[in-house]
Amino acid sequence: MRFVAIKTVEQQALLSLHRARDLLVRQRTQLVNGLRGLVAEFGICIPRGLARVIGFAEDITLGEVLDLPDIANEVIRNLSEQLMALHNRIRWYEERLK
């Protein structure tokens, strides 16, 4: 039988930062894939890579309007805003971990 040392409160707190960040990264990945798939249905190709999708989302949140129906533009804007908020939260966690 193996025995494991009990974690201190500080170690457990640091672990909570890692777990929360990991959860948000997985959510961001899901959102990126969903957004890329949604705009692809309208013939808009966002190249692979997080930076390119973030750049697309920034343009949308700053007011760029695609030549799509109003409902599609609203959905894409909402998802882009959610992606930017999630991305900023992840950056906060990364700064805390440093």
Image (tube, helix red, strand yellow):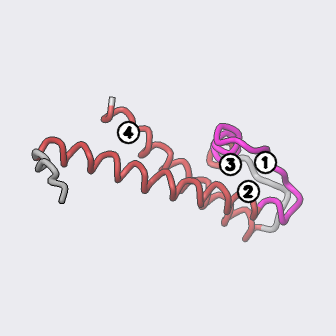
Q: Distance between the residues labelled 2 and 4?
A: 24 Å
Identify whether 62 is placed above or below 1.
above
Looking at the picture, which amino acid does disc 4 mark? Trp
Q: Nearer the viewer, residue 7 or 10?
A: 7
Nearer the N terminus, badge 2 or badge 1?
2
Looking at the picture, which amino acid does disc 3 mark? Ile
Q: Where is residue 5 in the image (x, y as percent from the top left)?
A: 13, 47
Residue at the image position 45 percent from the left and 54 percent from the top: 24
Nearer the N terminus, badge 1 or badge 4?
1
Q: Name the residue under label 2.
A: 36
Q: Position of residue 58 (x, y in %)?
A: 63, 42
- The answer to whether the residue labelled 2 contacts the one labelled 1, judged by CB atoms less than 8 Å apart, is yes
Q: How far apart are marks 2 and 1 (CA)?
A: 6 Å
Tell me which segment is drawn in magenta: 39-58
Instruction: Assign a secondary structure to mark 2.
Output: helix
Q: Residues within 10 Å of mark 3 (few under 14, many from 20)?
A: many
Q: Which residue lies furthest to the right in this view?
A: 43
Q: Distance between the residues labelled 1 and 4?
A: 26 Å
Q: Distance between the residues labelled 3 and 4?
A: 22 Å
Q: Distance between the residues labelled 2 and 3?
A: 13 Å
Image quadrant containing the C terminus:
top left
Q: Residues within 10 Å of mark 2 (few under 14, many from 20)?
A: some
Q: Residue 60 carries which label?
A: 3
Looking at the picture, which amino acid does disc 1 mark? Ile
Q: Position of residue 4 (x, y in %)?
A: 16, 51
Instruction: Assign a secondary structure to mark 4.
Output: helix
- The answer to whether the residue labelled 3 contacts the one labelled 1, judged by CB atoms less than 8 Å apart, is no
Instruction: Assign a secondary structure to mark 3.
Output: helix
Instruction: Assign a secondary structure to mark 1.
Output: loop
Nearer the N terminus, badge 3 or badge 4?
3
Image quadrant containing the N terminus:
bottom left
Q: Name the residue under label 1.
A: 46
